[in-house]
Image: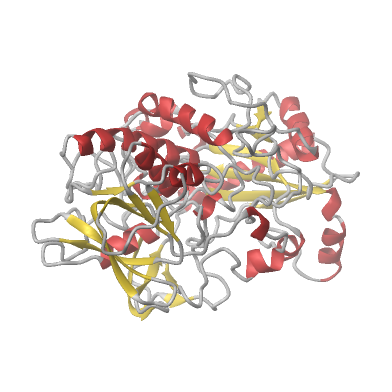
Amino acid sequence: MSARTFKTDESVDFVVVGSGAAGGVIARELSVAGFSVVVLEQGPRLNATDFEHDELKYTFLHGITNDPVASPQTFRRSAADTAKQGNGVMNPLVYARIVGGSSTHFTANYWRFHEIDFNERSVLGGIAGTAFADWPISYRDLEPYYTQVEWDIGVSGLEGSSPFDPPRSKPYPMPPLPVKSSGVLLERGARKLGLHPFPAPMAIVSKPYRGRPACVNCGFCMGFGCEVMAKSSVLYTMIPEAEATGRCEVRSRSYVFRVESDPQGRATGVHYFDSEKRAHFQKARAVVVSANGAETPRLLLNSTSARFPHGLANSSGMVGKHLMFNQQTAVHAVFEHELNEYKSVQVTRVVHDFYNSDPRHGFYGGGGIDARIGRQPIGWALASGGDLPTWGQALKARMEAFPRSMVAAGHATSLPLETNNVSLDPTLKDAWGIPALRITMTHGSNEAAMMEDAAVAAAEMLEAGGAKNIRINTEVQEPGMAIHEVGTARMGNDPKKSVLNAWNQTHDVKNLFVTDGSCFVSSACQNPTLTMMAITVRACDHLIERFKRNEV
């Protein structure tokens, strides 16, 4: 069957806002279960043949990401500061605006969360000044759904290769991708130090899988769409399966700006602009918001009414609060011989010996370290921080050493603070006249100590691996200038302290669901996409049963 087209005045079972990792899962799960689904995506729809190896266009000219001119944002470090708009070149928060969402341009690191990530509060105790809390679900609850996602989309990896991995009910569907130079060198250095490197789980297929070809090692993964469909984006996996049911329409260039609700507090559908900025209303029996950890709270906050004067589903006041990111640091190393890291995928080896938080270090948080290329040449030249050169002969030498260079990247946690949040800017509006996103974010000494520790550990591995020149950047990433935004509509059992229940249903509006990274209670220390997708499949199981019993 072919994809269906619904009329704008035709009521559907579900309208889904966003077509990224979570939205793509929702579309597939619900349409396969027999429901009518309309997915609304602000960006365009591109096919594999439309993607390009154009670093300037994709990294600096917003080829498939949010445009800071049409969709500006403001940033401030605290509520006492005046939020300021960027320079029009790059927003504080950058994410894909395209059918498939950020699953089209992600690096494709696909670690599972560990058991500790769901119950850190019980294990470690409280952390003063934070909203540190256990999740209302456990790793055991989520494990079957991790497995389902890995097999549905295609993840390459090696079961049992890390002694720190949580239990699995099934191995990966295919072997890991071939190791490349950076992986060999990180592994060599890590093993000399008694550590346990292992093949990186990647959402990139290492062999032909379900009609898609294996990776061709082009090197353009991070920030680029995959031209051969080897990257396991929902653009190539979930969405085509949803459309094949004949019950799902993916409506691109459709910007949702408001979720409508009736006086009884039920969602009735969404208002959106089409590509010509004409307003429409899509009726639905239930609404699922999967716009990402920044745009989802922005939409809810903009959906005010007499019943919800502070934003839809926001009786707790928690919508937009507890903004978190995965902290990242980079250690650049030069070796004697060419590595040619610009070929193949970003990552082939990971170290998780530092994953768990260790209070003896004097800070909260743990994480992983992986070996990678880092940025393409333009981004490499512009990279700054720590003692990286930015001018003159030192920069020239660093650029000439690009083929002999690699990065060891640290990935770590972010504390949930109510003062770190997204809200609506009171004065600035986007090109559609909707209040712009305002980010309020700052990090403290905990993050600084954690990132310095990660950088030092990475540098030790690189030195043991034979690096001739190591440059360490221990600076905490500029608050706001980050990826993997999560936590802004958190799950919880107490409606006064959370936005969603354990099934991603809003406490306030029974037919409104949020399934993206907004639901996270803690950030953990890795790409959140696999966990986001597993949570979404789990929520769908519950939602389908409730919907069939007419309880939603």
Nearer the observer, 115 or 515: 515
Q: Is residue 393 left or right of residue 526?
A: right
Give the quarter of the image for residue 236: top right
Residue 413: in sight, yes or no? no
Q: Is residue 224 left or right of residue 465?
A: left
Q: Is residue 337 left or right of residue 124?
A: right
Residue 243: in sight, yes or no? yes
Q: Residue 479: where, in percent of width, then height?
A: 48, 60
Q: Residue 136: where, in percent of width, then height?
A: 28, 34
Image position of 38 with respect to 305: above or below:
above
Q: Quadrant of the C terminus?
A: top left
Give the quarter of the image for residue 292: bottom left
Q: How is the image coloured?
A: secondary structure
Residue at the image position 58 percent from the left and 42 percent from the top: 232
Residue at the image position 16 percent from the left and 39 percent from the top: 550
Residue at the image position 75 percent from the left and 43 percent from the top: 216
**Outermost residue toward the left?**
264
Q: Residue 175: where, in percent of width, then height?
A: 67, 26
Residue at the image position 70 percent from the left and 60 percent from the top: 52
